Amino acid sequence: MMYAAIMGYGTIGSGVAEILTECKDKITRSAGQEICLKYVLDLREFPDSPVADRIIHDFQVIESDPQIRLVVETMGGLNPACSFVKACLKAGKHVITSNKALVEAHGTELMEIARENKVNFLFEASVGGGIPIIRTLYRCLMGEEIQEITGILNGTTNFILTKMDQEGAAFEKALKEAQELGYAEQDPSADVEGHDTCRKIAILTAMATGREVHYEQIHTEGITRITDVDFQYARKMGMSIKLLGTARISGDKALAMVAPVMIGSENPLYGVRGVYNGILVKSQMLGETMYYGSGAGKLPTASAVVADLIEAVQQDKEPVSAGWRNEQQLMEESGKFRYRYFVRIEGAAAQKKEQIQKAFGDAETIVLEGTDEFALLTGEFFEEEFVKRAIGFDTESQKAGEDGIRQMIRVQVQ
Ligand code: HSE
């Protein structure tokens, strides 16, 4: 028998406790021994919960109990999660976390402490909820050079964008519904401004390259500026708009971005709807693989935590090498990304033909009946080149006393 403690009895922590009880036989068979939950650390009391007799409020109890070999961190945030996790690793305990902020900000240091103390530090649930993507990268694809990872990594924004696409809902209404259903983070800006996706793609890029990547290094845009009108155009073009976290790796350099992108039905991520997540990985020998499932929620996320617990038991004597080195990944400027661009402009296309040709070369024109504007779908440009052209177009428009570009959305190049 191996004893475990859970730190944080919130949605995921309580899900882990539930699975440990519900699936006890299967977990024991897989781990080779029983995992016995001894403590649940939380500030609150849970007198009516099944773990009422195991609730503790003092972290020292876990740290100083030599019987505790497994610790689950589902508190979230950095403080005191980081110091508790460090102390557990130093005390020779395996740590499993679902906390992406912790992994992204302090992963490198925690991985080093785990290596020094010959224990496992596992974090499958920190990206893609229940989808097995971290283990896929360090185990299944361990012989592959990863060339690209593109993911719908945030269920809340995907739920909102799906509502806008399928029901023509406005952004605010769709966000309110996501909050009512409990999908959105406490502060919805983490979801809708793209920061949650950014942390996740930073972790995946670090997993793929074996080097540290921080979210500050990744150009990030959210979905707050996407409107129902954009979706009307997208539908007309047979496309949808998804918030994508993308990383491309070439040689010793990586290129990453988080932004809403128009994708067509030929893209496997097109069919990822609602609160689901999808992650497309392109690797050197295998080619494209796609991982799809519940990216959030109590039991799916807890399922990933439990799988890590089992792996930690199995690898008790020989800790898993999951993570990255204490070395910074070289990141290229996001201007090196190459897209086509969807651009909305006020007025009539026929009257701006020359100006458009001069700025963007040959571009397709899309008209939405009953509006005072039109849209362009440009050819392919490097982002840095497109930005120069867009600024040129805006400057010319201003000189003519007209509005410039109303909206720009990147369009996936296959
Ligand atoms: N708010 C996150 C999401 C939760 O919507 O995907 C999982 O990280």
Image (spheres, rainbow, N blue to C red):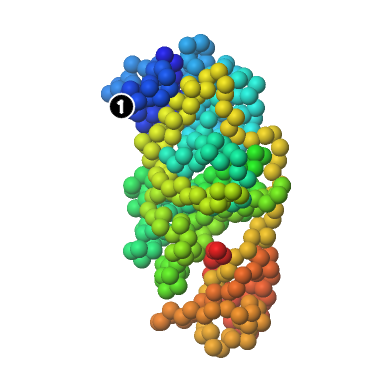
- Seen in the picture, residue 266 relative to 233 is either above or below; the reply is above
| SS at badge 1 | helix
- Seen in the picture, residue 236 relative to 291 is either above or below; the reply is below
Residue with the most extreme left position: 48
Tell me the residue at 61%/49% (across/down).
Answer: 284
Q: Is residue 53 rendered to the left or right of residue 116?
A: left
The picture places residue 178, in percent across and down from the top left corner, at 37, 51
Tell me the residue at 65%/39% (across/down).
Answer: 210
The picture places residue 313, in percent across and down from the top left corner, at 48, 21
- Seen in the picture, residue 163 relative to 202 is either above or below; the reply is below
The picture places residue 316, in percent across and down from the top left corner, at 52, 19
Tell me the residue at 50%/64% (across/down).
Answer: 262
- Residue identifier under label 1: 22
Q: Is residue 104 rendered to the left or right of residue 372?
A: right
Q: Looking at the image, which is closer to me, 208 or 405?
A: 208
Q: Is mark 1 within 8 Å of ligand 1?
A: no
Q: Is residue 244 rendered to the left or right of residue 44?
A: right
Which quadrant of the rendered structure holds the N terminus? Answer: top left
Q: Is residue 381 rendered to the left or right of residue 174?
A: right
**Number of numbered labels in the structure image:** 1
Residue 108's image quarter?
A: top right
Q: Is residue 237 visible?
A: yes
The picture places residue 276, in percent across and down from the top left corner, at 40, 49
Residue 166's image quarter?
A: bottom left
Q: Looking at the image, which is closer to me, 353 or 80?
A: 353
Residue type marked 1: Glu
